[in-house]
Amino acid sequence: MMMKLALPLLTVPMVLMAPTGAASGQMAAPTGLSVIAPRDLTVKAGGGQLGFDDATMAQFRERVATNAEVRRSWRAVLADADTMLGQTPAAITGHPRRITEQAEPLILAYRMTGEARYAAKLRDILFMMAGVENWVTDAPLLRRDPPWNSDLQMGTTAEMFGLIYSNIRDTLSPAEREQLIASFMQRGVQPVFNDWIDGRRRIHTLDTMGHNWWAHIVFGTGAGLIGVARDAPEALRYLDRLDQAGSEWWAFAGNRLESKIATFGAQGAFSESVNYAELAVGTYLNYRIAWQETFEQAPAAIPLLPNAVDFLIHNLYPASTGPYSVNFGDGGHQKSYARTAANMWLTGDRQPRYLWYVNAFAGAGDLRRQPRYLAHLPLASEEGGKGEMPDLPTWLWDRDMGWATMRSSWAQDATMLAVRSGFTWNHNHADAGSFVLYHHGKPLLIDSGNSSYATPEYDSYYRQGIAHNVATFNGRNEPEAHTYSGSHLTGALPHMLVGGGMRYLMADATGPTSAYFERNFRHFLWLDDGVILVYDDLLAREPGQFAFQLHAEGTVQRRGTSLHVENGGARVEVRPIYPTSLPDAGLPTDYPENVRLTTLQGYKDHAPQERTTFYRFEPAELAQRQKLITAILPEEVGPAVELERLAGPNMIGVRVRAGERVTEVYMNLTADGSVKHRNSIATVMGWETDAYMVAVTYSATGTIERLLLANGSYLRRDGEVWLDSLSKRYLIGSFTGPQPEYWVQGQDNTALTLRLPGQAAQVTVNGATLHPDTGGDTIRLRCC
């Protein structure tokens, strides 16, 4: 059956810009104007069973016949379906107003066996829903002014309604189809469009509620509309408008006045953390798959989609005892987000890393045992079912969202560091500058997580700065109101460099903490796979008590000058270096000049009834300006490490000795904003520079193997120029390979000079190979 319907919709996007030389009070002629023409959506010929079409069922029957594990899984699904035959529709769905994924065993059973009893039970579920007057399950929403006539659950209910309808359509009479569709339009579609899309009655906007609610409700309803589209020409009008609206949701750029950020960052990070990225993107993909199965025309192009899925992958920590997901904000530390990766694979983008991600959650909760995915995805025992380790970089830097991850490798039980410094609101906690560390298969330095949204601790503790690994001033970090009103001045991760065995990341938490801090910069320098140095550069509005705050998982003990954390055999040492160490012996009162270790009480993740201990390293003196250097040492990584505190004129730092290699890290104290109109010139350990931070690694013979420079315009030593740039740069250089390699950030399309040790014949800069052809020891180029 082929159906076409012209969609009479006129939408005119407008961009108004003030022209150069325009008269006062006049606007420029609109640019970029176009009329969005209605599309003729054409339904594909064929059966139209969403998720369980004839071709899929034929392949599944072959898999059942040839693979014992698939056969066992199918029999388990069939047993569930048989059990449901003796239950009422409400018992199957769990609520008379809901249709959930619990109905899927009945769908697969019917499509595999063709037995009418399974279709009859599914028919009963649809007619139960058709007889419910209102589909809202969150009843208080109906009492709001104006009432909210759709809730989060309606996205799932609508999607499942369409899924069931499309798969038992052949058992329904024309009158039954008409009755069911009329009810679906009245109870499911119209309330959603009236609340979220249709300007004649709409009460929501992307600027206020355009996050996971918008996506789950709207795209779930879209999937349901697709399921009934063969018998409902009016569904095509709704779907064309919905697809356009969905593109705007993906591209929403934020609202300065409303203190609302964009929906996604350029690298795919979602505005509401990992957990709600899965809900929003996973539901969108359900809708996209249904569209591809039903229409000849492609859905709207979403360029960010692959990055949004890879965002989940970058935030997975694979461990031999089971995977973890980075749990900044609201979410679950060991919750599976495999649906989104599986759905991306089902769109036809068959990247092996998607199945690798799904397989990471193999076990009792393996998504591939669920009927819809069992029919499509190979199990681990089948060819390709385990996927392949990601071919992605071992780091993610989403500058737009203030979200970064770094790992020693993609292998299980590696070391992983994640940092967040972005937007505070709703599901995003007050955690600007916070970090977490996984090592040897366990979480060690952790985020406190969250609890039920109804508990008082959720808002008073879990969402506040006290629950995160941040710098504090007089025990404070961000105003508590930010979790409701939003941090108008957001945090940022403005610079990140990875190369030569060095990983550098800058976090600027000043904006959201500006009620207490005038300067709140945190720098992470991870050397090889071992030492992580954290440098806090802090300035408050008045003198007070600064602190480095730390939450840990496992057994925590003070040993000498360090705090040692052990969790299931994984260990990390955390050691204050500057302004002083912890006292090595005696009572704290014997060493009043040293950093103090204080303990406080918090709450366990998802268990506010259980108390935990967390920690602060506090300098002895009250101050208005403070520098803190803290070393994080994942144990059993590489050669034994020795740390030595460095100090000199206008400089503090750390000497890191690992085997025969030595890395010296210098922080230039004249570059902390206290000097204006004069450059931050310093000579540190023989290096002349104006850089904020310099790190240099020397071999056993004293050869310079690599260096890092943060925010510097020149670096000189013994009359030789290593960097020359009129504007300040961030740079890593590595000199141990066959040719020098540089990674550079800074002002675009400007000149800089880089050193070529040994008069190299070529040099690599940001991945591009250049041939100096100068015969000298430097290269001058436009860059970065």
Image (spheres, rainbow, N blue to C red):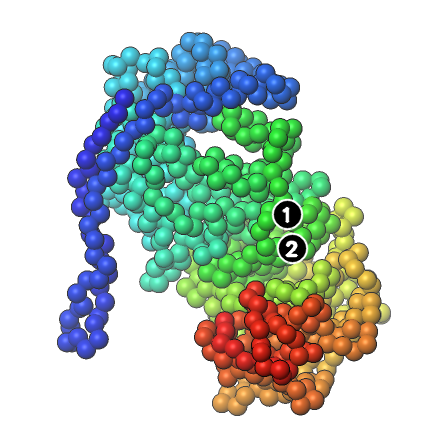
Q: Position of residue 50 (x, y in %)?
A: 40, 26
Q: Amino acid at mark 1?
A: Tyr
Relative to 329, say whether 472 is above or below: below
- Horizontally, residue 252 falls left or right of residue 603, namely left
Q: Position of residue 549 (x, y in %)?
A: 64, 63
Q: Amino acid at mark 2?
A: Arg
Return the residue at label 2.
407
Q: Quadrant of residue 146?
A: top left
Q: Position of residue 593 (x, y in %)?
A: 75, 77
Q: CA distance from mark 1 to mark 2?
A: 9 Å
Rendered residue at 82%/63% (across/down): 640
Residue 691 visible in rendering: no
Rendered residue at 39%/20% (across/down): 167
Q: Are marks 1 and 2 in contact (CB under 8 Å)?
A: yes
Return the residue at label 1.
317
Marked residue nearer the N-terminal end (1 or 2): 1
Relative to 546, say whether 233 is above or below: above
Q: Rate crowding at label 1 as few (under 14), some (14 to 19) or many (20 or more) other CA atoms within 10 Å.
A: many
Circle 2: element type:
strand
Relative to 570, say whether 171 is above or below: above
